[in-house]
Image (cartoon, rainbow, N blue to C red):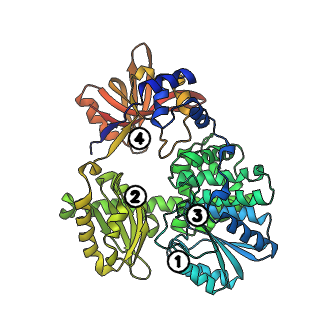
Amino acid sequence: MEKKWLLREGGDESVVMTLATEMAVPAAVANLMVQRGITSKKQAEEFFNPSLKSLHDPFLMKDMNRAVDRISTAIARNEKILVYGDYDVDGTTSVAMLYSFLRERHSSLDYYIPDRYHEGYGLSLKGIDYAAQTNCRLIVALDCGIKAVEKVKYARSKGIDLIICDHHLPGDEIPDATAVLDPKQPGCNYPYKELSGCGVGFKLIQAYCQLQNIPFEKIIPYLDLVAVSIGSDIVPMTGENRILAYFGLKQLNEAPRLGFQKIIEKAKIRMPLAVEDIVFRIGPRINAAGRMESGSKAVELLVSQDSDLAVAICNDIDHSNDDRRKKDSEITSEARRMVSEDNRMNNSRTTVLFHQGWHKGVIGIVASRLIETYYRPTVILTESKDGFATGSARSVPGYDLYQAIESCSDLLESFGGHMFAAGLTLKQENLQSFRERFEKFVSDTIKDEHLVPSVNIDAEIPIEDVGISMYRYLERFQPFGPENMAPVFVSRRVKTLACQPVGNNGTHLKLSFTRQNAEPIGAIAFGQADMMEIFRECGGVVDIAYSVELNEYRGKSSVQLNIKDIKA
């Protein structure tokens, strides 16, 4: 499917030129700053030199005093605390962080990760029962709980208090917990609203340390966990998230905890690590534990202080990740075949598929894969152990998937999520009605432009401008993530010097391009081997959209282009 190229508007020329002069950078770099809302030298210096001193006072968050007081009381009374979190990366890193912090100060402690297949996301009755059976008087729920109104009442009936640390949007009613920490809840004046679940947990630790006069330096080692949560949960890389990720990456590169160290060694990840290593190498391995076995295994690895045990768990998780890849590939192939054989879907604006034998742990990934192929809102469902159809939904950029699913709420047993991703459960007899209703709502509300993939481009530049000097400027914009993505450029009428398929199945392209008065420059186009035809059609003269990166091979470093798209 041909992609749309969306060229961003350049910044105000006078502001760009002033910033270029004051910061002693090329105008193209100053333009990137202005596009990101940086319009003064002071803002630029704060952006390029993140400081932990710029973190907000944690007590600005609603209920923070109550949360810290309740934890302090539990420690003083030697009450048992249960640290509870979801089975994804944000949940397991959150639990590992708070558990590791508390175990240095409190001996009566446990953690709990719900089972993906028997309990699902969020606070579960089974988890609360476990807390009651093991004499826990306090549950700290991380990365979940903001909608758990009835579960909080149930816990209270068992004599258990709850502190909720969440970052998701609340429902109409806030749970009546001892404390609710969520920057998105009504009445919370915390200045930054986009923290990850682990980020909210870190603010709780920061607040406790302030009250107990524990130096901030003592909690910097936990920032590796926060950085992994930020990268994996795809939250905006702005404000506090960018500061936490910046110093978390520093921790991950210089002194990672044992569990991360073993993952890095096992996956053979080259240092220094960047956000993309978290997103594509570290995060999927942690996630694989919850997808294929139990998220508790990921926490066990991340809190481990025994090298042999960490290696053994890491090996188990690596096997889970291999299993996840295999299942992902098999189910994706089967799902594509189902679409191709269903004539109704050829002109549909949605994909809704159900197969009772698909593995629940990978259907969210499969939904994302199908969007890469068909580029439309997608729901992938399988049969749960209680006979319901349960699954994951994914959207295309710009379209509110949650609203579309909510329009079918009378057909659903449960659902939750946000604009781009959701989970849902329904009776199998409602499947056809859901498929028709979902298709109609999306058809009536989605715009044509939402159904065409696009490449967001920051600027058009001559290919001759790309070099090590430019790369060094661009490097300072890291860490990259939503709302601060790696800059993408376009260069026109570039002449191809060489082009050949590479990779195990020849799915990628290795390229080089000629340049006037400059050395040829190399490039890689991942998953774009089918573009070979374009080069034949136009004699190798193409327009390219790309980001700039550093390629290291056999001890030598060179700048290369990471091709996002190619047009004749």
* Viewer-nearest of discs 4 and 2: 2
- 379 vs 433: above or below: above
Residue located beneath label 1 in the image: 149
Residue 188 shown left or right of residue 504 in the figure: right
Q: Nearer the viewer, mark 3 or mark 2?
A: 2
Q: Residue at x 38, y 43 (%)?
A: 527
Residue behind mark 4 = 526
Pick whichever, 289 or 99, lies toward us: 99
Spatial distance from mark 4 to mark 3, Cα to Cα? 31 Å
Q: Which of the two labelled residues, at mark 1 and mark 4, occupies the earlier sequence position?
A: 1
Q: CA distance from mark 1 to mark 2?
A: 24 Å
Residue 453 shows up from this direction: yes
Amino acid, disc 4:
Phe
Decide: few, some or many residues near mark 3? Use Cα within 10 Å; few <14, some 14-19, many ≥20.
many
Res. 91 mark: 3
Task: Judge the density around disc 2: few (<14), some (14-19), many (≥20) Cα neighbours within 10 Å.
Answer: some
- The residue that label 2 is drawn on is 420
Task: Give the percent coordinates (x, y) of residue 346.
Answer: 20, 58
Query: From the viewer's perspective, is residue 251 above or below residue 306?
Result: above
Q: Quadrant of the N terminus?
A: top left
Residue 424 x %, y %:
40, 71
